Image (tube, rainbow, N blue to C red):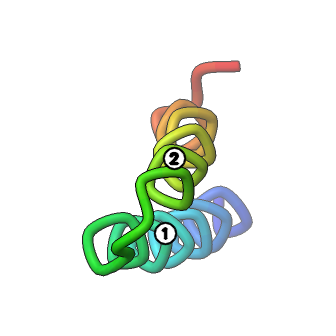
Amino acid sequence: MVLTIIYRLIIALVIALVGWNLFTEKKFTAQLTAAMVLIPLVLRALMIK
Protein backbone atom coordinates (compact mmCIF):
# COMPACT_ATOMS: atom_id res chain seq x y z
CA MET A 1 0.00 0.00 0.00
CA VAL A 2 2.76 2.44 0.94
CA LEU A 3 4.76 1.53 -2.17
CA THR A 4 1.72 2.25 -4.35
CA ILE A 5 1.37 5.72 -2.86
CA ILE A 6 5.08 6.43 -3.34
CA TYR A 7 4.86 5.10 -6.91
CA ARG A 8 1.91 7.37 -7.70
CA LEU A 9 3.69 10.38 -6.20
CA ILE A 10 6.75 9.75 -8.35
CA ILE A 11 4.58 9.34 -11.46
CA ALA A 12 2.68 12.54 -10.60
CA LEU A 13 5.97 14.42 -10.33
CA VAL A 14 7.15 13.10 -13.70
CA ILE A 15 3.78 13.97 -15.27
CA ALA A 16 4.03 17.51 -13.91
CA LEU A 17 7.56 17.94 -15.28
CA VAL A 18 6.71 16.53 -18.71
CA GLY A 19 3.53 18.63 -18.83
CA TRP A 20 5.51 21.74 -17.97
CA ASN A 21 7.96 20.88 -20.74
CA LEU A 22 5.05 20.34 -23.13
CA PHE A 23 3.69 23.84 -22.62
CA THR A 24 7.00 25.71 -22.45
CA GLU A 25 8.65 24.09 -25.46
CA LYS A 26 8.52 26.11 -28.68
CA LYS A 27 9.31 23.40 -31.21
CA PHE A 28 6.30 21.40 -32.35
CA THR A 29 8.24 18.14 -32.59
CA ALA A 30 9.38 18.46 -28.97
CA GLN A 31 5.79 19.18 -27.91
CA LEU A 32 4.61 16.13 -29.82
CA THR A 33 7.25 13.98 -28.16
CA ALA A 34 6.23 15.23 -24.70
CA ALA A 35 2.58 14.50 -25.48
CA MET A 36 3.46 10.96 -26.55
CA VAL A 37 5.41 10.46 -23.32
CA LEU A 38 2.49 11.76 -21.25
CA ILE A 39 0.00 9.18 -22.51
CA PRO A 40 1.57 6.09 -20.88
CA LEU A 41 2.45 8.08 -17.76
CA VAL A 42 -1.17 9.11 -17.25
CA LEU A 43 -2.28 5.52 -17.81
CA ARG A 44 0.24 4.36 -15.20
CA ALA A 45 -0.97 7.00 -12.73
CA LEU A 46 -4.52 5.69 -13.19
CA MET A 47 -3.15 2.13 -12.75
CA ILE A 48 -4.30 1.12 -16.24
CA LYS A 49 -1.77 -1.16 -17.92
Residue placed most toward the observer, 6 or 25: 25
Residue placed most toward the observer, 4 or 34: 34
Label 1 sits on residue: 18
Residue placed most toward the observer, 14 or 35: 35
- Left or right, 34 with reference to 6: left
Image height of 11 relative to 36, above or below: below
Q: Which of marks 2 and 1 is nearer the N terminus?
A: 1
Image height of 4 relative to 38, above or below: below
Label 2 sits on residue: 38
Q: Residue at x 51, y 46 (%)?
A: 38
Q: Which residue is drawn at 71% across and 19% down?
A: 49
Q: Determine whether the residue tagged by mark 1 lies in a helix, strand or loop.
A: helix
Which image quadrant is residue 47 in? top right
Q: Where is residue 2 in the image (x, y as percent from the top left)?
A: 65, 68
Counting labels gives 2
Q: Determine whether the residue tagged by mark 2 lies in a helix, strand or loop.
A: helix
Crowd rating for badge 2 (residues with CA inside 10 Å; few <14, some 14–19, many 20+): some
Is mark 2 in CB contact (under 8 Å) with mark 1? yes
| Marks 2 and 1, how far apart at CA | 7 Å
Q: Quadrant of the N terminus?
A: bottom right
Q: Which amino acid type corresponds to the residue marked 2 in the rendered image?
A: Leu
Q: Which amino acid type corresponds to the residue marked 1 in the rendered image?
A: Val
- Left or right, 26 with reference to 14: left
Q: Residue at x 73, y 66 (%)?
A: 3
Q: Residue at x 46, y 34 (%)?
A: 46
Residue occupying the far left of the picture: 23
Name the disc covering residue 46, or none: none
Residue occupying the far top of the picture: 49
Residue placed most toward the observer, 1 or 14: 14
Q: Where is residue 29 in the image (x, y as percent from the top left)?
A: 54, 51
